[in-house]
Amino acid sequence: MRSFIFVTLLSCCLSACIEPYQPEVGKYDSSVVIDGAFTDGNEPSVVKLSRSFAFDEEEGPPIAGAELKIEDDLGQSTVLQETHPGVYQTDPSIYKGEIGRRYRLLVTIPGEEEFQSDWEELKAAPPVESIGYQFEERIPDDPQAQPILGMQLLLSTIDPEKNTRFYRWDFEETYEYGIRYPPAIRVEFGARPGRGQDEVFPIGPDEYEGFSCWKTEKSTRILISSTENKTEDIIQDFPIHYVDNSTSRLYRRYSILVKQYAISKGYHEYLSALSATNQTTGSLFDPIPNELFGNIKSSSGEDIPVIGYFSVAGVSSKRIFVSREETPLGIFFPSGPSCVLDTLPLNFRTLHDELELHKTELFDYLYAPFGIPIGFIVANPECAKCSTLEATNRKPDYW
């Protein structure tokens, strides 16, 4: 679906007084937090262990050195490896989910209680039928602000067998943008800059950044839907993501990879409650509320609170590309970061202080007529190196 008709959306028609939201939480208790998923995909399945924390704190400490095992209803199992403190993952080349099998998570924390999740069946995820898009104009809440132009991505899927019913999605978006001033030279300062031991070298082919960067970002919002109360198991035009023209995402080429999960009813209800509680952002990576319990309990049967959920789900995926030529005329996108250049005298002490104090990047010499260097040119880092904005100058294989 490619619609080039601008649709004006009113994001807010009524104004109201809003009081600050203060969630009702019980007395703070350092409970165990177990959160993760197991799929039939080719990527590692990840489970995170940590401790809960008070509402006014930022994060809880990870639980390292635990033993985590996933087992199925046939008695087969695999031990997860700890890759970072509190982060455990499977090796899908050795063990991954199978459609129709039931799985659970077993957790042993040294010197503490053992925990286990409820059994969950791994359902097949139907293919993503389509990811379409339409270009829209949105009116922001601020009446003084200009309308926002952008692209609304819409997902559709269908399960003819009517077995899925509960869906979750996440995505990663990759886009190409330009940098204007990749360094042509580099400097090595001596022990005392400006005292004759400084050297300038041309940037070699292996070091040259080039003018293109590719940046990948992952979704954070909770994206779920259900067809439980519908006759057909069909999702039509679910708004998966909106890309506005305030960034360079659509300047050259844009890609989105959407993963679709066939989740259980219990996990759908858990995520619905989590989304309602984290109403400020609705993010999957917000702190889990201290009283939101899922499908994990003490193996001994004791009433020990465990926060979090272990989900078992089939997964499917779809990637699409959108090039600049496919966007309507009249929508403008920045080519890359805003750039500022500055010139310095041909003095290594001055150059050293500039690079150290203002964190700029050396771009090139400033030349007089006939190619004589008379100074240095520096630029803000995001206009000189892809890595400044956590991007790369290496084109992805799928590009």
Image (cartoon, rainbow, N blue to C red):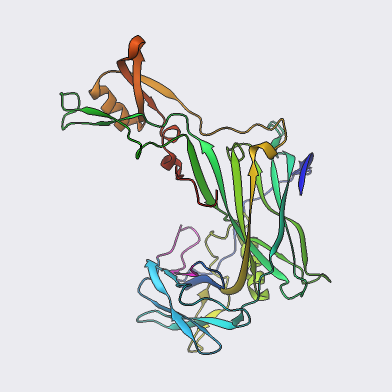
Q: Nearer the viewer, residue 87 or 13?
A: 87
Q: Residue at 42% across / 40% down in the picture?
A: 388
> Any magenta on residue 58?
yes
Q: Is residue 154 above or below residue 265?
A: above
Most extreme residue toward the top, as rendered?
369
Say which quarter of the image contains residue 146: top right
Is residue 295 highlighted in magenta? Answer: no
Q: Which residues are magenta?
A: 44-61
The picture places residue 197, in percent across and down from the top left corner, at 16, 27
Position of residue 223 in the picture relative to residue 88 (left or right)? right
Name which residue lies at 52% across and 49% down: 216
Q: Position of residue 208 (x, y in %)?
A: 38, 36
Foreground residue, 242 or 2? 2
Where residue 141 sits in the image (x, y, percent)?
Answer: 70, 40
Q: Say above or below: 2 vs 285.
A: above
Horizontal and vertical percent position of residue 45 = 50, 70
* Residue 118 visible (yes or no): no
